[in-house]
Amino acid sequence: MMRIASLQTGSALAAAALLSACAVGPDYRPPSSASLKVPSRFVADRGVPVEKDLAHWWTGFNDPVLTNLIERALAANLDIDAAGARLRQARASLRSAQGGALPTLDASGSISRSIGQGGRSVIDPTTGQTISTGGDTTVYRAGFDAAYEVDVFGGVRRSIEAARADYGSSEANLHATQLSVVSEVALNYLDARLASGRLVIAKQNLAAQDETLQIVRWRVQAGLASALDLEQSRQLRAQTASTIPTLETNYASAVNRIAVLLGEAPGAVTAEIGTGTTIPLPSQAIIGAGLPADLLQRRPDVAAAERTLAAETARIGVATADLYPALRLTGSFSGSDTSFGDLLSSAVGNIAGAITAPIFEGGQIRARIAGQRATADAALAAYRSAVLTAIEDVENALTSLDAANRREREAITSAEAAQNATTYARAQYQAGLIDFQSLLDSERTLLSSQDSRASARADRATAAVQLYKALGGGWEAAPMPASATGSSVGAYSHTSSASRP
């Protein structure tokens, strides 16, 4: 009888294994570039200068302070730490899903001691066996229970597939956070340098306007100029002075933001950044922006959207598996004896199989399937949108960089001409050859031209940073945060670190 039962059980398991070779629900295949409407080339790509090494593009600015700040931000930024913890959470969810495909096993054991006189017989409540005792008696009991739900229609495998895709999405989101932090540090650094440069320009012009104001006072006292000239000079001087507090605020905001991005308190890096006025520009390594299709792999936000689509597609199979019967196998093995060595010989076991199938669910299962298909459709739309947005970002960045290059060339010419015109106007006004209004216009134009020149240079550097970000550069060589492996020490300590699946 035992042999027949074993053969029947083996046949059932073999049949279940054959059935479990298939999984219900759609098999995921990434959408093609054509279906995503990815163009063959960028319209605005004209061989614009971009760094060949996109993984370390900030080193092309040849600014040691900028490089140091970015590397520190990648190591200590709190948003990156949070993204790393979410990655670790996704890894744990994946391991949990993988554990659902394995049998469960529970063991139990006990020892009981009876103290008394005379021999007697007792019945073990666990096994129903009669145990003869005499005097003091020790009874040993041990057993285990096992259960396994056969993944006949692939619901568990689809769950694992979804969890693995969720893990990939979390990893891509971590890289997207790293990319964002790198670009934000660079942009705020450029803002700080621009504010510092504009502050120097404003103070230089203020000093020149103080000299002009003194000249006007002398001429008014000598009866060579009117009070109108004096008031106009005072007005221009006050207008220039009023811009200084705003520029100081802009500088402080930028450096404080950099400190927070580095996981430090505001003001922690102010002295390190200093008051330098040179706005760094990237080196001119001229190559094209690449192919739009490259963004599907390089841009982490696009990769995250694609992995989310894969996860939601797999969950259609999870929901569909609920329509079909479930096969659950259970078994137990237990025994008891007054001798520990005889436990195995006195043990008895049993194995059972149970099939459950939905009969009437009021349409709930099919409603869940329909809902999950809608969720997958939404994920597909989000993925398509992410792809098109990435292409849009690159096109806009290419256009902005080209425009910034042309604008800076003209701004340089304008500032040089304004400086010369102001020098001539100041000399001619002192000689009485021109009226004060001409000098006033020259000084006002000089401040505007110099300010525009500094802004144009900053716009050129900013456009380069935005292009690198749009191309998806800056995360490839970033270190894996400690929070992603569980080795960091925060509000509590970790006793072990998780391994990457």
Image (cartoon, helix red, strand yellow):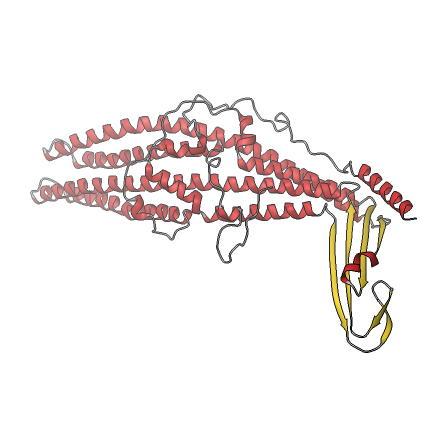
Which residue is found at the position 41% from the left and 31% from the top?
464
Q: Position of residue 152 (x, y in %)?
A: 80, 41
Which residue is found at the position 33% from the left and 40% from the top?
65
Q: Quadrant of residue 415?
A: top left
| Residue, far bottom | 117
Quadrant of the snapshot with the C terminus:
top right
Q: Position of residue 359 (x, y in %)?
A: 87, 49
Relative to 149, is 123 on the left or the right? right
Relative to 32, is 472 on the left or the right? left
Q: Nearer the viewer, residue 61 or 450?
A: 61
Q: Position of residue 298 (x, y in %)?
A: 53, 32
Q: Nearer the viewer, residue 200 or 383?
A: 383
Q: Nearer the viewer, residue 309 or 199?
A: 309
| Residue, far right | 1
Q: Quadrant of residue 277?
A: top left
Q: Nearer the viewer, residue 230 or 364?
A: 364
Q: Is residue 460 in view from this perspective?
A: no
Counting labels gives: 0
Relative to 460, is 445 on the left or the right? left
Relative to 69, is 497 on the left or the right? right
Q: Is residue 458 in view from this perspective?
A: yes
Which residue is found at the position 76% from the left and 62% from the top?
340
Q: Position of residue 148 (x, y in %)?
A: 77, 49
